[in-house]
């Protein structure tokens, strides 16, 4: 069960986590609690994996090169191909999805050459072709996702 | 959006998360042989130039109960894709919205929007809202739910 403090931390700091020498003290002052309470509550959120991390969100393609990649893999091969794909450090999301294109992953590398090298390697080792879907435009508004923590 | 080698080191040191200590920027500075004010100044600059979009406690939607993660994909008129994409991105339940290239004939879709819902019904309602917003500009669409999360890390640039 999440306390009101946990919920405030989850909801209020998706956008403006303080960039100051003592960010947890700043948050504590904003919420009227102690710095230790804030640190302990974030520790719980991190341990329960309710937050994936606290840190900078980098704009896609601002540094390095990234692409969404899809593969259409037979059911018989899906498990090992998925495992092969996940084994690359350049792969940072990998999802099985319900479609003919059933494996979807995001590749991030430090440059295009590296990215294309990884894709060629995955194709050679899996025996399957990939469909490369780089981002052409990113539509965003700078707001956090609105969480409903009440049910 | 020019960054130098030190900016890049800061991104590498922080992209998996700041340490959960009272002075996290100081901890990063020590790790890189910099001072905390310099780390913070560079992070401010990177926010201003758009390299860093924001600094966040990033929620894990799935663990919070948003188990229905749908990648909705739409085939819309290219000439309208930017205005439509912007409007879809403004919907409160859409976390990401991108234009991507089509791969004909296998893949006709050029607009991607990620939705997150706690129930399948909520997800269906959200998709209906997007469909209504896009109206006659949609030629066809598909929704790809994730049946399994196989790997998920924060942004990590493998060097």
Image: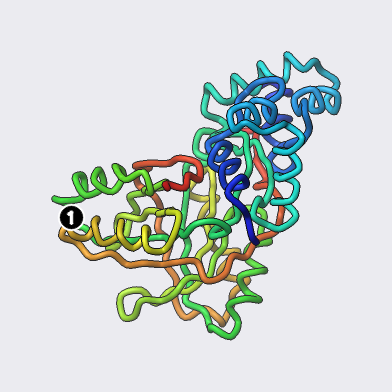
Please state the total of marks drawn on the protein image.
1
Q: Residue at x 31, y 80 (%)?
A: B105
Q: Position of residue A128 (x, y in %)?
A: 19, 61
Query: On the image, which quarter does residue A101 sit in?
Result: bottom left
User: What residue is drawn where x is 21% and y is 45%?
Assistant: A79
Report the side of B19 relative to B38 (left or right).
left
User: Is B145 drawn above or below residue B152 in the view shown?
Assistant: below
Q: Residues within 10 Å of mark 1 (few under 14, many from 20)?
A: some
Image quarter of the N terminus of chain B: bottom right
Secondary structure at numbered mark 1: helix
Q: How is the image coloured?
A: rainbow
Check disc 1 and report the residue beneath it.
A126
- Residue A10: percent from the left, percent from the top? 67, 33
Q: Nearer the viewer, residue A79 or B14?
A: B14
Q: Is residue B117 placed above or below A127 in the rendered structure? A: above
**Residue lying at the far front of the rendered structure:** B33
Tell me the chain of label 1. Answer: A
Q: Is residue A51 left or right of residue A113?
A: right
Image check: A150 left or right of B13? Answer: right
Q: Position of residue B150 (x, y in %)?
A: 34, 42
Residue drawn at the location 69% of the way across and 30% of the way down: B25
Spot occupied by residue B120 in the image (x, y as percentages of width and height): 47, 48
A35 or B116: which is nearer to us?
Answer: A35
Q: Quadrant of residue A40?
A: top right
- Which quadrant of the view contains residue A30? top right
Task: Check the image and report above or below for B81 versus A102.
Answer: below
Residue A13 visible, this angle? yes
Residue A12 seen from this side: no
Towards the viewer: A135 or B133: A135
């Amino acid at each position: 069960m999440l306390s009101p403090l946990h919920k405030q931390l989850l909801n209020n700091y998706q956008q403006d986590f303080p960039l100051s020498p003592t960010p947890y003290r700043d948050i504590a002052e904003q919420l009227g609690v102690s710095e230790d309470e804030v640190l302990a509550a974030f520790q719980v959120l991190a341990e329960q994996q309710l937050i994936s991390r606290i840190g900078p969100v980098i704009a896609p393609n601002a540094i390095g090169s990234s692409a969404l990649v899809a593969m259409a893999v037979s059911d018989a091969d899906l498990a090992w191909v998925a495992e092969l794909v996940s084994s690359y450090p350049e792969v940072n999301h990998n999802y099985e999805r319900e479609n003919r294109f059933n494996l979807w992953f995001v590749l991030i590398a430090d440059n295009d050459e590296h990215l294309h090298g990884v894709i060629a390697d995955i194709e050679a080792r899996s025996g399957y072709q990939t469909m490369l879907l780089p981002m052409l435009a990113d539509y965003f508004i700078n707001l956090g996702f609105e969480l409903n923590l009440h049910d | 959006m020019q960054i130098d080698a030190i900016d890049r080191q800061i991104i590498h040191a922080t992209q998996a998360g700041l340490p959960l200590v009272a002075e996290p920027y100081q901890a990063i500075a020590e790790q890189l042989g910099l001072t905390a004010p310099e780390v913070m100044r560079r992070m401010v600059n990177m926010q201003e130039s758009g390299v860093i979009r924001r600094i966040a406690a990033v929620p894990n939607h799935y663990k919070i109960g948003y188990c229905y993660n749908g990648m909705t994909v739409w085939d819309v008129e290219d000439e309208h894709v930017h205005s439509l994409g912007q409007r879809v991105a403004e919907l409160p339940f859409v976390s990401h919205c991108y234009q991507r290239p089509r791969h004909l004939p296998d893949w006709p879709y050029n607009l991607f929007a990620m939705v997150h819902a706690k129930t399948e019904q909520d997800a269906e309602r959200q998709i209906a809202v997007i469909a209504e917003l896009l109206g006659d500009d949609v030629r066809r669409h598909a929704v790809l739910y994730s049946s399994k999360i196989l790997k998920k890390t924060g942004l990590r640039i493998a060097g």
